[in-house]
């Protein structure tokens, strides 16, 4: 046994390195799939370029330091000549070269930061974003209407977004379009958004704000410019009085409920502002700030008891008779 143990060969260097190489590859592929590293607008592209420059620079520095450390450990007895060389390496490699690298990165970071402050052209409109626990209210200042949990913008053009909070500190972040900006009570900030191509981009609150922080999401939907104008015109229209008897009955049930104290439907006596504006509810993709798809079944469950889907939100349960609920759903589905 002693003889066999003495002649056992150690693992080849390739086998020792392989697990670490796999781990680094996994991290690299994971990073490439992140939304922040898949930019879809000029601001996000600038941020991604800064990230890559810092990542590549730090990786090269790390490799050089590890190689130098390995050589130093391999040759411990270096003599007087080696000690002089070591002092030179400490001076240049430990102070002068790192200083140049840090200053260079600082200059490039300042250049990118300045780029991010102003959009490349004059914004076509302004949207006022108000963060609530745990949903988003977006007011189109130039057009006089509001949406909830969705911002619509024209592709290839910039939109200015004013940022404020109704309660606690939140943060506005659309990783593929721009960086993170905090939203604090009693303070109005701003950020601009621009998407290169039409599409849907995920936004979220990036500052912990309470128990439903994870379910405080929104969508940025970029349209072709002509489709965006059509969307604006559609959302400026005040819904008419329903002509269909069943839709009309559903409207009367809605207007006679406690819903009117929290929600707005333009053109009716529903003028509440505690909850989202429902004027164009049926055109939205999600319910509850990304909690559920906007379908009839989910909407019914949300009305009856939203707490089962999003505990801690401010909407109380609303038990209703089955027929009344169905007629109200038909009415809400007409609000496009």
Image (cartoon, rainbow, N blue to C red):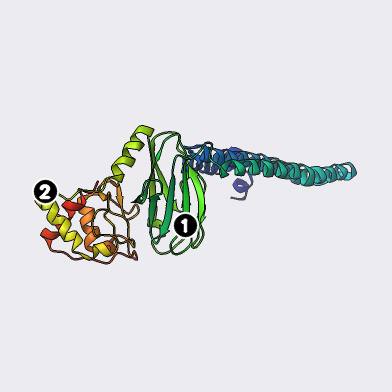
Q: Which one is nearer the viewer's eye here, 85 or 172?
A: 172
Which quarter of the picture shows residue 257? bottom left
Query: Label for residue 195?
Result: none
Disc 2 element: loop
Q: Which one is nearer the viewer's eye here, 232 or 147?
A: 232
> In the image, residue 112 lies at what x, y percent?
61, 41
Q: Is residue 282 visible?
A: yes
In the shown orientation, is residue 202 left or right of residue 298? right
Which residue is at the far right?
Answer: 80
Query: Label for residue 164?
Result: 1
Which quarter of the picture shows residue 9? top right
> In the image, residue 37 lies at what x, y percent?
50, 40
Q: Is residue 12 visible?
A: no
> In the image, residue 231 lies at what x, y percent?
32, 40
Residue corresponding to mark 2: 244
In the shown orientation, is residue 111 left or right of residue 308? right
Total marks drawn?
2
What residue is rendered at 47% in x and 53% in y?
A: 163
* Mark-to-mark CA distance, 2 and 1: 40 Å
**Pointer 2: residues within 10 angstroms few (<14), some, or many (20+)?**
few
Q: Could you tell which of marks 2 and 1 lies nearer the N-terminus? A: 1
């Amino acid at each position: 046994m002693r003889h066999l143990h003495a002649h056992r060969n150690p693992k080849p260097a390739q086998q020792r390195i392989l697990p670490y190489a796999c781990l680094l590859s996994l991290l690299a592929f994971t990073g490439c799939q992140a939304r922040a590293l898949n930019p879809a607008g000029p601001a996000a592209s600038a941020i991604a370029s800064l990230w890559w420059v810092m990542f590549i620079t730090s990786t090269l520095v790390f490799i050089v330091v590890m190689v130098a450390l390995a050589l130093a450990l391999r040759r411990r007895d270096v003599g007087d000549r080696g000690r002089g060389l070591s002092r030179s390496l400490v001076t240049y490699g430990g102070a002068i070269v790192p200083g140049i690298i840090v200053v260079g990165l600082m200059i490039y970071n300042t250049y990118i930061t300045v780029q991010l402050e102003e959009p490349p052209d004059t914004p076509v409109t302004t949207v006022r974003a108000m963060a609530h626990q745990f949903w988003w209210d977006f007011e189109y200042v130039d057009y006089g209407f509001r949406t909830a949990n969705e911002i619509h913008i024209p592709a290839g053009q910039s939109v200015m977004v004013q940022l404020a909070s109704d309660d606690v500190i939140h943060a506005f972040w659309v990783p593929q379009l721009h960086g993170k900006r905090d939203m604090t009570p009693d303070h109005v900030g701003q950020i601009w958004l621009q998407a290169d191509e039409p599409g849907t981009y995920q936004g979220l609150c990036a500052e912990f704000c309470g128990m439903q922080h994870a379910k405080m999401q929104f969508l940025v939907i970029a349209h072709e410019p002509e489709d965006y104008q059509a969307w604006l015109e559609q959302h400026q229209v005040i819904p008419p009085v329903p002509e269909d008897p069943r839709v009309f009955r559903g409207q009367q049930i809605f207007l006679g409920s406690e819903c009117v104290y929290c929600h707005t439907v333009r053109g009716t006596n529903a003028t509440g502002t505690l909850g989202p504006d429902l004027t164009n509810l049926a055109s939205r993709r999600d319910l509850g700030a990304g909690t559920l798809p906007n379908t009839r079944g989910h909407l019914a469950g949300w009305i009856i008891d939203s707490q089962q889907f999003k505990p801690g939100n401010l909407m109380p349960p609303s038990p209703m008779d089955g027929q009344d609920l169905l007629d109200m759903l038909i009415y809400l589905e007409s609000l496009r």
